Image (cartoon, rainbow, N blue to C red):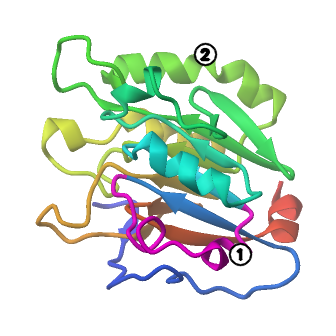
Amino acid sequence: MSGFSLWKQAGYSFVEKKRKHGDTDMKILVLADAESKYLWDYFDKKKLEGIDLIISCGDLAPQYLSFLATFTHAPVLYVYGNHDTCYADTPPDGCICIDDRIYVYKGIRILGLGGCMEYQYNGAPHQYTEKAMEKRIRKLGRQIRKHRGFDIMITHAPAYRINDSEDLCHTGFKCFRTMIEDYHPQYLVHGHVHSNYGRDFVRESRYLDTTIINAFEKYIIEIDETALQAAK
């Protein structure tokens, strides 16, 4: 895997990402693929204190996201995972879908592209060929130009050969790598690749100037808003 480095984040807990925290930091809780018993079965409102934004990278029960939205003032954003077919009839209440759009929160530009590589070939929702995903990205061109890029890219599937797997379903998109190369977002946050898939689980890695995060279950990102704005 030349051209980028990967390292394994050994073990993880709810507050596993520790960075310098100041008044200008934004705490984002990212979620994907597995409902956290810590947050759902053993919920305490204090567990969401200090969280500014919640983002789902897909494949989570809509009731779970609605539950979290009930107990926080933070916006709850989401993109679709390949198993989120029930959202058409039962969307998560009080949450905001950011699929195929750029959502701006406190000056931070967040681009959403849900779904995974097509593997069923029967028109199943939220599954895309490489060409179909490229078409979605082209349709975002006007929004990207309007906002002069984006800071965080939220996807369900990973980028090609960055935290992905070799089976078709879990193969990442090459066009996601191109997005990183062209726009240099601060973060790409994805799901889809679970920690129990029998391979080394990579929580965080880096490709060029972009930090790649697998949001499986739950993870907290702390962003220095001042530094981010200065870098634009």
| Residue located at (32% from left, 33% from top) | 82
Q: How many labels does the image show?
A: 2
**Above/below status of 185 relative to 218:** above
**Above/below status of 98 relative to 193:** above
Q: Which of marks 2 and 1 is in front?
A: 1
Which tag, 2 or 1, sits closer to the chain's start? 1
Position in image of residue 115 (x %, y %): 39, 32
Q: Which of 58 and 73 is in front in this view?
A: 73
Amino acid at the residue labelled 2 = Lys
Position in image of residue 88 (x %, y %): 45, 21
Range of residues picked out in magenta: 33-52
- Badge 2 element: helix
| Residue located at (38% from left, 61% from top) | 216
Question: In whole angstroms, how far apart are the C-alphas of marks 2 and 1?
Answer: 37 Å
Q: Residue 139 carries which label?
A: 2
Neighbour tally class for label 2: few under 14, some 14-19, many 20 plus, Cα within 10 Å? few
> Predominant secondary structure in magenta?
loop
Q: Nearer the viewer, residue 78 or 202?
A: 78
Any part of residue 184 in sight: no
Disc 1 designates what residue?
49
**Above/below status of 174 relative to 132:** below
Q: Quadrant of the N terminus?
A: bottom left
